[in-house]
Amino acid sequence: MMPEEIYVPTHLLVAPVLIPLVAGALMLFYHDRYRQLKLGLGTAALLALLVVSIEMISRVKGDGGTFVGTYLMGNWPVPVGIVLVLDRLSAMMVMLTTLLAIPALIYAAAGWQGKGQHFHSLFQFLLAGVNGAFLTGDLFNLFVFFEVMLAASYGLMLHGSGVERIRHGMHYIAINLAASLLFLLGAALVYGTAGTLNMADISRVVPLLEGPQRALFHAAACFLGLAFLIKAATWPLCFWLPGTYAAASPPAAATFAIMTKVGLYVILRLMVLTFGVDAGASAGFGAPVLILGGLATMAYGTFGILGATGFRPRAAMSR
């Protein structure tokens, strides 16, 4: 087994969050009648993100070993400070997000950008939240980036108004607020048992937990897993997704597709770090449930696509 190789990058690691955040904030200074200017700024931001994601991929790829990049915000040490972490999986997800966002923004320029207020700013804030969720190294900032992502998605979901869109939008907001509450409860329990919210520190502490502390940590993992499974739209928690995605505007629905992958990404990340082979008695906790849930979701989506009567419901079921 190859030894782990730690690579510490420059400020490049914060760029996938900073670029869309600055671009979205800058657009707020301009009235919505300057849509072409906002489109130009948004396109420039996405092209810059593409360049950054390509550079990140090139820095973490290699013929052997595990390449991990870390960035300490304000140079505060772990677990006190905020840490961003880059590896092959997170770099790939950032690039995937950018490659999906570019055609969605181009399609929005055909008319959807003018159906409501601040479309371009909301679009950029959504990307900042998604990229931050992929790169963060602790649960607290994962929650922060989740909320940034969700707050922007609420506006994009309701973009264009209409009775059907508002009805499903309110449903979508209520479900995600409930999932966020579960997220907070789980994070609080993790901090109470492990004494840290840093993912790497949690993986170090888990094998040392015993008795009631281990049981309480497992309960925390259940709360977190339930929250992420709702956001990932895993069966039977996927009841909110078909109607929501079908009612959303096409560019918004396209960007929402990556949001469900954020939930799956976090589950994969926490399962490998926290309940891997080195987790002692907690190794493999919840794995059978995730496997069965994944298979049931695939079956539900397949039958849903076969039974859908229109393009939008069929596309929504494929997410």
Image (cartoon, helix red, strand yellow):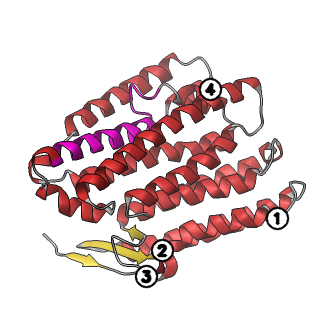
Residue 79 position within the rendered picture, expressed as x and y whole percent measured from the top left: 33, 70
Location of residue 242 by image quarter: top right
Residue on which disc 1 sits: 29
Please identify, in this view, whether the residue under mark 1 or under mark 4 is nearer the observer. Answer: 1
Q: Residue at (64%, 57%) from the top-left corner?
A: 125
> Given the image, on which type of amino acid does mark 1 rest?
Phe
Residue 277 position within the rendered picture, expressed as x and y whole percent measured from the top left: 13, 54
- 164 over 2 or under it: above or below: above
Kindly give the residue lying farthest to the right in the view shown.
33
* Residue 123 tag number: none
Label pair 4/3, CB-CB below 8 angstroms: no
* Highlighted magenta segment, given as a residue range: 213-238
Judging from the image, what secondary structure is the residue with disc 3 in?
Answer: helix
Residue on which disc 3 sits: 75
Judging from the image, what secondary structure is the residue with disc 1 in?
Answer: loop
Q: Quadrant of the N terminus?
A: bottom left
Query: Of label 1 and label 3, which has the lower sequence position?
Result: 1
In the image, is 163 to the left or to the right of 124? Answer: right
Q: Residue at (41%, 73%) from the top-left corner?
A: 81
210 in magenta: no
> Given the image, on which type of amino acid does mark 4 rest?
Phe
Alpha-carbon span between mark 3 and mark 2: 14 Å
Residue on which disc 4 sits: 311
- 36 over 175 or under it: above or below: below
Q: Residue at (50%, 70%) from the top-left corner?
A: 54
